[in-house]
Structures are given as structure tokens and as C-alpha cells.
Image (cartoon, rainbow, N blue to C red):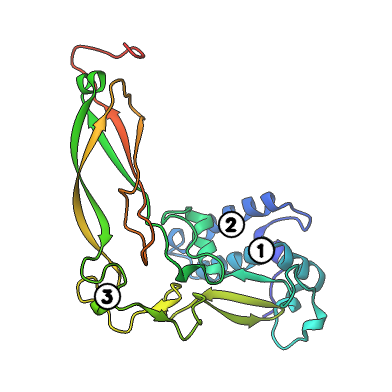
Amino acid sequence: MAKRDYYEVLGAARGASADELKKAYRTKAKELHPDRNKDNPDAEAQFKEVNEAYDVLKDADKKAAYDRYGHAAFEGGMGASAGPRGPRGGHPGGDFSSAFSDVFEDLFGDFMGGRSGAGGGARNRASRGSDLRYNLRVSLEEAYKGTQKSIRVPTLTTCDECHGTGAEGGAEPVTCPTCSGMGKVRAQQGFFTVERTCPTCGGLGQIVKNPCKSCKGAGRVEKERSLSVNIPAGVETGTRIRLSGEGEAGLRGGPAGDLYIFIEVREHALFQRDGLD
């Protein structure tokens, strides 16, 4: 069966701007999401068609190729000379990330702290730990005078057995043989080179031959830490206190993230706050 025009799939005009295309995609994706159309057997196929269309039209290089050559621009077996060359050279259209993660990010946002991985080679270096948030409620008296509070924070800390390497006996991880340490693998798709997360190392660029028994190769373990927090006088609901380096431990020896304490002042039975009074 012949493929439908990508603009028609999104319900957008051929000269639509990037913002208009994104708006049309979001509307169609929400309308056709399988979870909202359990009684429609065609919803999943239509949802995939919408994702495929937007994956092409949101990328300037791929959109230019599609506008000029149509679906033929992405069909295998054609000579590379038939299509446009990307600004980075080497492969027509340049490199781009797998569309699978883009679908969920466009629909649901960065729930897990942003797009996974960076460009070639970045994933096998030490990486900073994630920041953490802790909501702390204090009384009106404590907010007025200031106080010291003890909190317990569940977090990921560096494994004591392997010192964060993830390997038994503290041995260093080795370069992943599949991606040569890049964390990503490439495959040709029509005029374009598709870059995907390496299935062997999960994008880290390294593998552990003998995983640490304590952390199972992760290099970090879950622990609950006790911390003392200084609450200065005059705080109010929404005040943010940063504890540098008290977030999750970094990977492969990277620095720890930060812990952010968000203050909420409880209402008093008799008194009401008026600004700083």
C-alpha cells in the first residue's frame, strides 16, 4: 500500500512552520495514542504513522529531502548521489538520533532528566550524578527564628566494594567491543545514517566483565542518608536551599549532583504571616 503524504498524515499545510508542525503532531499523537483508543484496532498503526511523519518533518535536513524527493528519499537501495548532502559532510543529511525516544519526550516531557546520552564518545566518560529534590515543611515559628533540621534522604551512593567502577575487585571497565567506546551504533537508512544507543553497553561505551556482586555492576547502591539542614530565619514557602554535592553519586567517578530543599511553611492556628512580619 502506498504511503500517505507526511503533511497529510499530520493534518498540516506543506508550507507549515516548525511550530505549526509540532502543534499538529501533538494534536494527532494525543488523538491517536493507543491508550486512548483501545477499541480502535487501527489506532496503533496510525499512531506510528504520525510519529514517522513528524520524525522526518521536524528535522530540517530530512524535511528538505522529503520536500524534494518524497518518500523515495528514505527508501534503501538508491544511490547516495541522488539525495542532498548534510552540513556536516560524510553522510547525506548528517547524523540524527533515534526517533523512538523523541516520541516519548515530545508527548510526555523530560521525566527522567532529559535526553539519554550525548554525542559520540561522551557516554563513556565520568558523568555527574542527578540532582535531588526534598520537600521540607517547617512551622511558622521555625521560619521566623530559623532552625536546624535533620532529614533522611534516599539516594544512590558510590558502591564501597568496587569504588564506583562496577567491577569485581575494583577492576576498571573495558571498552565496549560493539561500539568501540562510542556508546552508539550506526545503521544506514536510505540517504541517512541512523544513530542508536549501543545495545551491548546501553550507551555507556564500557562494559564490566566481572560485575561487582554488591552493586551488580551499577557502581552505585541505594542508601538512605541522614543530613542536617540549616534553615535561616525569614524563609517562606517556595524558598529553595541548595546542598552542593549531596545529590546522587556520579557514574564512573563523576561528581555528585546537588540536593535542593524546597521549604513549605505550615499555617499557624492563631497567627498569619504578612510579608516578613
Identify the element where label 3 is drawn: helix
Residue holding disc 2: 28
- In the rendered image, residue 148, in percent from the top left (x then y), is placed at 19, 31
Viewer-nearest residue: 266 or 148: 148
- Direction bottom: furthest residue: 77
Identify the element where label 2 is drawn: helix
Q: Earlier in the sequence, mark 3 or mark 1?
A: 1
Where 78 sits versus 163, above or below?
A: below
In space, the residues marked 3 and 1 are separated at their CA atoms by 53 Å
Q: Earlier in the sequence, mark 2 or mark 3?
A: 2
- In the rendered image, residue 123, in percent from the top left (x then y), is placed at 47, 69
Residue holding disc 3: 170
Viewer-nearest residue: 198 or 84: 198
24 with respect to 121 (left or right): right
Quarter holding the C terminus is top left
Question: Within the image, what quadrant is residue 241 found in?
Answer: top left
Q: Nearer the viewer, mark 3 or mark 1?
A: 3
- In the rendered image, residue 251, in percent from the top left (x then y), is placed at 36, 64
Q: Are marks 3 and 1 in contact (CB under 8 Å)?
A: no
Question: Within the image, what quadrant is residue 64 found in?
Answer: bottom right
Quarter holding the N terminus is bottom right
Identify the element where label 1 is drawn: helix
**Residue drawn at point x = 54 percent, y = 71 percent:** 45
Q: Amino acid at mark 3?
A: Gly
Residue holding disc 1: 9
Residue neighbourhood size for the residue with mark 3, other residues' Cα within 10 Å, grouped as few (<14), some (14–19), many (≥20): some
In space, the residues marked 1 and 2 are separated at their CA atoms by 9 Å
Residue neighbourhood size for the residue with mark 1, other residues' Cα within 10 Å, grouped as few (<14), some (14–19), many (≥20): many
